[in-house]
Image: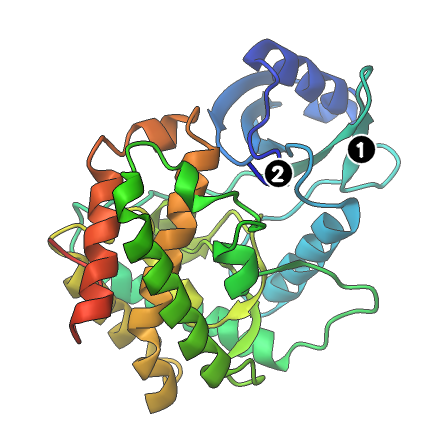
Amino acid sequence: MSAKQYDSLTDFQLTALAQQALSRYPAALQGELSLLCRSENATFLLKAAGKRYALRLHRGNYHQKADIVSELLWLDALRETGIVVPEAVADNEGEKVLTLLLPEGGARHVVLFHWIEGEMPTTDVDPKAFQQLGNITARLHQHSKSWQKPAGFQRIIWDHHTMTSAQSHWGRWQDAPALDPADHGVVEEAIDRVGQQLDAFGKGADRYGLIHADLRLTNLLLHKGETRVIDFDDCGLGWYLHDLAAAISFVEHHPRAGEWVENWIRGYEQVAHISDKEMAMVPTLLIQRRIQLTAWVGSHAETEMAQSLGPQWAAHSVRLCRRYLETEQLPVGA
């Protein structure tokens, strides 16, 4: 495996670190911590003085502190435009990104966010939820294209090499559970074609820039008619329409996935136009994301998310690669 991908600390150890971080915040924030989930990071719910907060404990070997500071700078800028996004809370020293040194070496970064109210839509909802997702994504992209990034701004790079190669950020796709080695050639052929397509497409400022990179329904909250976006942990530089591919992460093989893509595009175009050249790249970006997720599943096999996908998920990935190579259809659906 190319990199350490999953935090090997136990829930008890992570909770102890979260408690250590919490002690550095004002007295009004001292309260009850409970572990919500473990995926890329560990997320805790904090209940203090009748309010709720989300404490994000980063795993090691992923983001530098400067990356996380840059994420918070973008969130601050987005909030000024009226888009509801997470807001970090400063500790007693005015720091918003805390660093905890581990006894055995290494460090963990921590950010405490104000809680954002809202209901998370699921794939069982009306497909129009994807219109809302496309609409808010277009607003994020408009801001990204016009925003002057501060000096020292740095975020993770999402391109074909960092997403699908043996040195990708999320590990090797070959390590995905239940992926038949006999099918590796199909995936490799799809990766080669994707690379050729994206090389020709290029990284012009109209098509490549700062994106959320994981804007799916699980990172969308609906509250009293307002659409809210959370979890900017993977935001970085990538193709803008990668956010469309990310919108159906892990469920590209769902029978209604094509309908979801159509609704996302419809919602996006209520705010901003997708050029013909970008539209032509949608199949390529969709299959690239699925292969990227195949790597993630392999390197995060211990997570609840990976284990929930079932034994046929890898076979579906191969089937969608074949569809991409052999037809003009979108590589989604049953």
Q: Residues within 10 Å of mark 1 (few under 14, many from 20)?
A: some
Number of the front mark, 2 or 1: 2
Which residue does the image show at 52% across and 47% down from the upper left?
231
Specify whether 96 is left or right of 194: right
The foreground one among 187 and 207 is 187
Q: Residue furthest top?
A: 12
Question: Which amino acid, mark 1?
Answer: Thr
Task: Give above or below for 122 relative to 271.
Answer: above
The disc placed on residue 99 is 1
Image quarter of the N terminus: top right
Q: Residues within 10 Å of mark 2 (few under 14, many from 20)?
A: some
Q: Position of residue 288 (x, y in %)?
A: 38, 61
Which residue does the image show at 56% across and 85% down from the upper left?
204
Lower position in the chain sequence, tag 2 or tag 1: 2
Specify whether 134 is left or right of 252: right
Q: Position of residue 128 (x, y in %)?
A: 20, 62
Residue ID for mark 2: 3
Question: Which amino acid, mark 2?
Answer: Ala
